[in-house]
Image: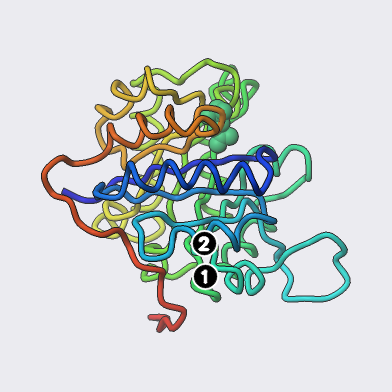
Amino acid sequence: MSKKYVIANFKMNKTDEEVVSYIEKFKEKVKDFNTEIILSVPFVSIKTASLMVKNSNILIAGQNLNENDFGAFTGEINAEMLCSVGASAVLVGHSERRNHFKETDVIINKKIMKGLRSGLISVLCVGETLFDKKNNLTTQVLQRQITECLNSIYANELSHIVIAYEPVWAIGTGVVATKEEIEGAIKTIRMLLTNLYDEKIASKVKVVYGGSINEKNVKEIKSIKGIDGVLVGGASLDEEKFYKIVSEFNEKGTSEKGTKKVSKKKTIEK
Ligand code: PGA
């Protein structure tokens, strides 16, 4: 049974002190879990959070990175900086970044490339808007996002990419996509990956769902065929609720240590 990913996205919430108090309580409760747990905390708390989860089964992620190497980009953070404070992963292409900060698939692709080069796991968020859904454009949107965001990414780099299917209309709205919709989108994503790579490779890529997940609906979502975990926003802010969500994905009786920080030295297969 492959490991499940449970990813928290704190967004622009929690002071450093609040992050510390959260991790103090949370870390202890999940210490024997075999789930891949990723906490996407605000930039300013990455260093503290990373030190706190050292040698545990929790990884710390940034919520964004700039696609440039360095230079005159006031207020921005690059991949190297994220790594230097202990981040192992980063969220890319979140709908809030696409919407508020006008990030395009081309920019997102560059961010993934920079992340990969620094050894970061990229959690690539894709998904249709309500307009797209109403106009039956979901497959078309997923096709554009997956194809453009993964442009020039080699098959052996996909082990460092988690795809999060997050329909925009389900984020922060309390409206969860139906089991059929999620299963359909996951199938579409794997079909697109099969076209870009091959079936064997596509079957190994982690695909999770995000959008109004909470401790009550997670059980049903977990039962969806082909799902590898969840990305949680609002409900991850409460450590107790998030613990319950993670518990659902913990495969009982097979306790083992989580993934170690990914190696920065990777060979690219052509
Ligand atoms: P939500 O957010 O769980 O609050 O809907 C999910 C996300 O933004 O990733």
User: In the rendered image, which quarter is residue 189 located in?
Assistant: top left
The correct choice, above or below, for 48 with respect to 243 in the image is below
- Element at label 1: helix
Q: Residue at x 36, y 65 (%)?
A: 55
Q: Which mark is residue 50?
A: 2
Query: Residue 162 in the image: x percent, y percent?
Result: 43, 52
Residue 155 at what x, y percent from top left? Answer: 38, 67
Residue type for callout 1: Leu
88 is higher (above) or lower (below) than 234:
below
Q: Nearer the viewer, residue 24 or 179?
A: 24
Whether residue 22 is visible to the viewer of this picture, yes or no, is yes
| Amino acid residing under circle 2 | Ser
Q: Badge 1 local density, few (<14 within 10 Å), some, or many (20+)?
A: many
**N-term mark: 1 or 2:** 2
Q: Quadrant of the C terminus?
A: bottom left
The x, y position of residue 135, in whole percent, is 59, 20
Q: Quadrant of residue 268?
A: bottom left
Whether residue 167 is visible: no
* In the image: residue 209, left or right of residue 200: right
State left or right for residue 260 relative to residue 48: left
Q: Quadrant of ligand 1?
A: top right
Residue at horizontal 67%, vertical 60%? 65
Q: Residues within 10 Å of mark 2 (few under 14, many from 20)?
A: many
Q: Can you tell which mark lies on residue 93? A: none
Q: Which residue is mark 1?
A: 116
Residue at coordinates 44% horizontally, 58% vertically from top-left? Answer: 53
Check disc 2 and report its element: helix, strand or loop. Answer: helix
173 or 20, nearer to the observer: 20
Residue 156 position within the rendered picture, expressed as x and y whole percent measured from the top left: 36, 71
